[in-house]
Amino acid sequence: AAGQNWVSPRARESSAAGQNWDDGDESSSGFESAEDLSNGASVSLENPVEYGCVFAYGADGMRICYFPRDGARQIFRLGAACVDVDRSTKNPELEFDRELYPVHVSVRLSRIVGVAQKLSFSDAHGESPYFSIAPKSHTIVPCVLRKLLSAGSHDAALRFARAERRQTPHFTHALEWLLFTALESANRDAMTHAALKQSLALLREFPNYLEIVVSVARKTDNTRWEALFTAAGSPSDLCRHALRGDRLRIAACYILVVDKLEGEVAGRAVAIEVMREALAAHDYRLVEDVIKFLLRPVRVTASGEEDVKPSLIGRVLNIIVPPPNSVLSLGARADRELTLDVTEQGILKAHLDALAREKDIFNMGAFVSDTSFDGIGYFTHETTAGGSAYIDNFSTALEAAVMSLRRRAAERREKATPSAAQRRRNESQYSLLAGDAFDLSTSSTDTARANALLDVARTARCTDWSLLIATTLGRVDVLVDMFRADGVLVKPWRDVCEKCAERSGDQELKEFLKKTVDEVDAACGRG
């Protein structure tokens, strides 16, 4: 009676035919057949599990015994020879943690449900450790898909996968298991190569195909990449496909694959494309990752001299970045073993030049912080007359910086939760021209980066940019420190702020500048 709780009606029909599926040391578990579902859910009969099977778990791991469609009639006539048995070697994803003991297989959920015990401790009254029981589950989606594909039922596998996509947690991981197993089994046998092609043909029907392929590649030895991408497609083509879909992180994952399979020249080419797109998207942490890939050793000539021009990049983790063709010496700080090519240096500098022209202090701060760009060297050499970041009109620059800051705040507000309570918090957080200096303990990451840029400008002794950033952020404390150190700056700064307020038709900007000037005057007066 206990055994019948583990098998479906179809499995019981098979056992009535006199066949014994138990090896003695294993416990057999059953499944929910279509008839067992009481909630009226529609389950496709193309699922091979639904025709009848027994999941057996024991010392040899999990085994699945599939019954023929004719059920007991076939078994009675042909015996065990008509039963298809899949072992864990064919379905490695079923080799789950041995601490998990399976108790049920749900066809409706496509999951093995089990229990696991863990040792717990209680601090109350010095109680002894005890075991607690926790339920866990394990998907059988890759197993079912593999079975359908091996039977040549691509359409049935696709329908099953689309249905499971809506209800299976971590569905992408299940597809990765499918491809990983097909790749691991691929060898000189034509059948296993066919399994790899069938799996990839199925995965191409899903929008996360590019992600799944490169994820599996990163989890396998690179000696298997050639077999994978021979069937999946050219890695450089897949990388550019990801770029066209604005999937920068996925595209970046293909760089190493391209470098390995298509050569260094192709790898650097796609890396530069990814870097350009990442710069345009202001994803500077990704830019930093690409920089680390593009760094190459400095060549040494026969005379022992380094064959390299003054470089934007001096080392990997703490990158030294003086502008190209400058006279700045890297000095004792620089480890000149790695550098970027001149073209790559120019791409980075041109991007920062564009941000400086727009007075986009947030993205300038993010660029300097996230890419380890030497902002001090940049401000030292590019903010003088003729430099790319030279400020020739402080009033215009101040207005441009404020407008850039406002646009950034508006973009962040659009992504905020539209509830009334959240809206009030957003207004408090993003009212950047309310006349108050930022509270860094509650400010956004953008604000912290802008303040980091301010620190860089002050360290570089770049007065114009320091005044510009401090005024835009309402950093009265910084302004007061600068004016106490150089009192000559106070009157020109005050005159520019007053003229900017008079010329602007923005009432909020006028109030902000007036309040900032009044606070600075009061603080300097007290000083």
Image (cartoon, rainbow, N blue to C red):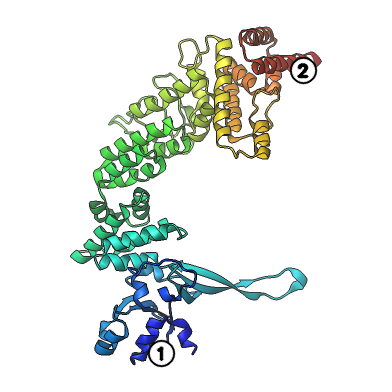
Residue 503 figure quarter: top right
User: Compared to 227, does 483 lie above or below?
Assistant: above
What amino acid type should be assigned to the residue bearing mark 1? Gly
Give the SS element for disc 1.
loop
Q: Earlier in the sequence, mark 2 or mark 1?
A: 1
Closer to the camera in the image, 3 or 432: 3
Q: Nearer the viewer, mark 2 or mark 1?
A: 1
Can residue 189 be seen by looking at this rendering? no
Q: Does 98 sit left or right of 459 as displayed? A: left
Q: Does 320 sit left or right of 436 as displayed? A: left
> For the residues marked 2 and 1, what is the alpha-carbon distance in whole angstroms?
88 Å
Residue placed under numbered mark 1 in the picture = 24
Asked whether the beta carbons under mark 2 and mark 1 sit within 8 Å of each other, the answer is no
Query: Where the C terminus falls, by quadrant?
Result: top right
User: Compared to 169, does 466 lie above or below?
Assistant: above
- Check the image and name the residue furthest to the right: 526
What amino acid type should be assigned to the residue bearing mark 2? Ala
Residue 190 in percent (x, y) is at: 18, 64
Closer to the camera in the image, 501 or 381: 501
Residue 256 figure quarter: top left
- Residue at position x 31%, y 41% from top? 241
Can residue 407 be seen by looking at this rendering? yes
Residue 69 in percent (x, y) is at: 29, 78
Give the SS element for disc 2.
helix
Residue placed under numbered mark 2 in the picture = 523
- Residue at position x 39%, y 60% from top? 163
Q: Does 60 sit left or right of 125 as displayed? A: left
Closer to the camera in the image, 386 or 72: 72
- Check the image and name the residue furthest to the front: 40
- Residue at position x 46%, y 68% from top? 40
